[in-house]
Image (spheres, rainbow, N blue to C red):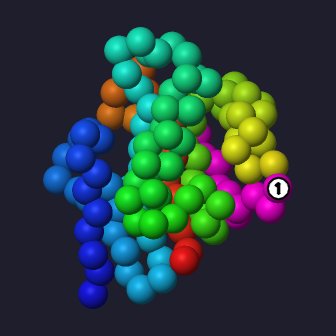
Amino acid sequence: MHKSIVVAGLGRGGPYSHATVAGDTVYISGQTGLNENNKDDFKSQFKNAMGNIEKIARSAGLSLKDIAKIGVYISDKSYFKEMNDIFGEYFNESPPARTTLVAGFVADNILVEIEATLHK
């Protein structure tokens, strides 16, 4: 059995939970950081996505330090170095396990999507 988390004021692109809690594990759905002001700005989109993840983690009583595994999906491999640099700003000590993939998105102006698994 799991508990669904939906954070008020945080958008969703469909009928899914922002996260689910199953025992001591929290699974955060993929978060994009796209808004009307950052269509071509990878860094801004990345930081917005991480801000969403942080809000969702807080709603589960956790923080970014509780992330055990993170998945980063980028729209183009040319963003990899920039992603690594920004990622290091968030996780410079004891970083979580990570998978990074180049992926296509449902909207052409989405540059990054991030999902996370947290453990209490």
The residue located at (82%, 56%) in the rendering is 93
> Which residue is depicted at the point 60% across and 56% down?
64
Tag 1's secondary structure?
Answer: loop
Q: Vertically, is 54 above or below 3?
A: above
> Quarter holding the N terminus?
bottom left
State the residue at coordinates (70%, 63%).
Answer: 97
Q: Residue 14, how many percent across, how many down? A: 19, 46
- Above or below, comparing residue 58 to residue 1 in the picture: above
Q: In which quarter of the image is residue 56?
A: bottom left
Q: Quadrant of residue 60?
A: bottom left
Relative placement, left or right, of 2 versus 25 is: left
In the image, the segment drawn in magenta is 93-104
Total residue callouts = 1
The residue depicted at 28 percent of the width and 51 percent of the height is: 7
When asked about the image quadrant of residue 26, the answer is bottom left
Point out the image quarter for the C terminus. Answer: bottom right
- Where in the figure is residue 32, as x and y percent of width and height? 43, 37
Q: Is residue 79 in view? A: yes
Residue 21 or residue 100, whichever sits in front: 21
On the image, the x and y values in percent for residue 2 come to 29, 80
Question: From where the camera sits, is residue 80 visible?
Answer: no
Q: Is residue 26 shown above or below 84?
A: below
Report the amino acid beneath label 1.
Glu
To which residue does mark 1 refer? 93
Q: How crowded is mark 1: few (under 14 residues within 10 Å), some or many (20 or more)?
A: few
Q: Which residue lies furthest to the left in this view?
A: 15
In this rendered view, identify the residue nearer to me: 60 or 82. Answer: 60
Q: As rendered, which of 56 and 83 lies closer to the eye?
A: 56
Q: Does the magenta stretch include residue 98?
A: yes
